[in-house]
Image: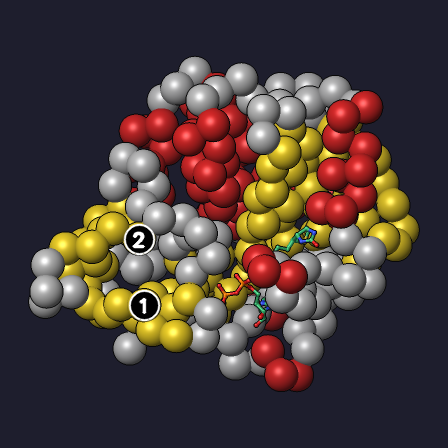
Amino acid sequence: MKWHIVRLTEVRSTNEYAKEIAEDVPEGTIVLARRQTSGKGRKGRYWASPEGGLWMSVILKPKTPIENVPKLVFVGALAVVDALAKYGIPAEIKWPNDVLVEGRKIAGILSECRLDRFAVLGIGLNVNNEIPEELEDSAVSMKGLLGFEVDLDEVLQRILRALSYWYSLFKSGRHREILDAVRRRSAVLGRHVRVIEDGEVLLEGTALDIDDDGALVVETGEGTKRVLYGDVSIRFS
Ligand code: ATP
Ligand code: BTN
C-alpha cells in the first residue's frame, strides 16, 4: 500500500478533515495532526489529543460488500497492537474499538464511512502525550509504560507497516484470518461483561466468542446473544 501523509499542526479532528477531503484524494491518504482541538470518540465522545500523541485518520476506498466495512475497525486495532508489540508492549483489543494495556486504554479506533464511497479509519494512540488527570486510572501512554519518549515517526511507520498487512488481508477477503487474530488478542473473551447502550445495560454475561461477522457472542443465562458492532460499550464486572 502506498501511503501519502498530510501533516497538520492543529485540526479539530483528523477524522472530520479526512472526510472533507476523502472524495478528492487517493486511497492511502493519511491525515496526521500534532494536536486535535476537538478529537472525538464514538458517539461524539471526547478524545483527549494533546501534543505528543499520534492522531491520524487513514482514507480507504475498499471495494467490498458493505457488510464487511465495520470489520475495518479490527484492521486498525490489529495494526496498533502489532506496532506496540515491537516496543515490547503487550496490548489487547477490547471489542470493538479500544486497545488496552493491563486494562488501561492506550488507543482507540474510530471508523466512519460514506456508503460505497470511502471509509476513514481514525487511530488515536497515546505515545508521549500527557494523560488528562480524570483519565489517569483508565488510560495510559507508551511513554508512561516504557519510561522514555518514543519517536513518533517510528511509531507511525510501524503502524503503517502492520496496517498494510492487515488491510491487504481485508481487501482479499481474508476476514477469517483477521477475526482469528482479533480473538487471539482479545481482552474480553471468557470474561463477564456488561453491554451498555445509551447508559443502559443491554445485557450481561460471559463473552464467548467474536463471530465471523465481528459480532460479540455473549452467554447471558437466558441463551446466547449476538451483539453487533455499533455504539455499545463493554464494561467488565
Ligand atoms: P470506554 O469503554 O473506554 O469508556 P467507550 O466505548 O465507552 O470506551 P469510546 O467512545 O470508545 O467510549 O471512547 C471515548 C472515551 O475514551 C472517552 O469517554 C474517555 O473516557 C476516553 N478517552 C478520551 N481520551 C482518551 C485518551 N487520549 N486515551 C484514552 N482514553 C481516552
Ligand atoms: C474511541 O475510543 O472511541 C475512538 C477514539 C478515536 C480517536 C482518534 S484520534 C484520530 C481520529 N480523530 C478523531 O477525532 N478521532 C480519531
- The reply to whether callout 2 and callout 1 are in contact (CB within 8 Å) is yes
What residue lies at 60% left-to-right and 37% top-to-bottom? 113
* Pick the front one: 83 or 113: 113
Query: In this figure, which residue is indicated by the disc labeled 1?
Result: 202
Where in the figure is residue 78, as x and y percent of width and height? 46, 41
| Percent position of residue 175, x then y | 36, 27
The residue identified by callout 2 is 227
Q: Which mark is drawn over residue 156? A: none
Q: Amino acid at mark 2?
A: Val
Quadrant where ligand 2 appears: bottom right
Under mark 1, the amino acid is Leu
Residue at image position (69%, 25%) is: 28
The residue closer to the viewer here, 227 or 18, is 227
**Number of numbered discs:** 2
Viewport quadrant of the C terminus: bottom left
Q: Quadrant of residue 197?
A: bottom left
Few, some or many C-alpha atoms within 10 Å of disc 1 (few <14, some 14-19, many ≥20)?
Answer: few
Q: Considering the numbered disc 2 on the image, is that residue within a helix, a strand or a loop?
A: strand
In the rendered view, does 126 fall on the left or right side of 5? Answer: left
Q: Quadrant of the N terminus?
A: top right
The residue under the point 58% across, 24% down is 116
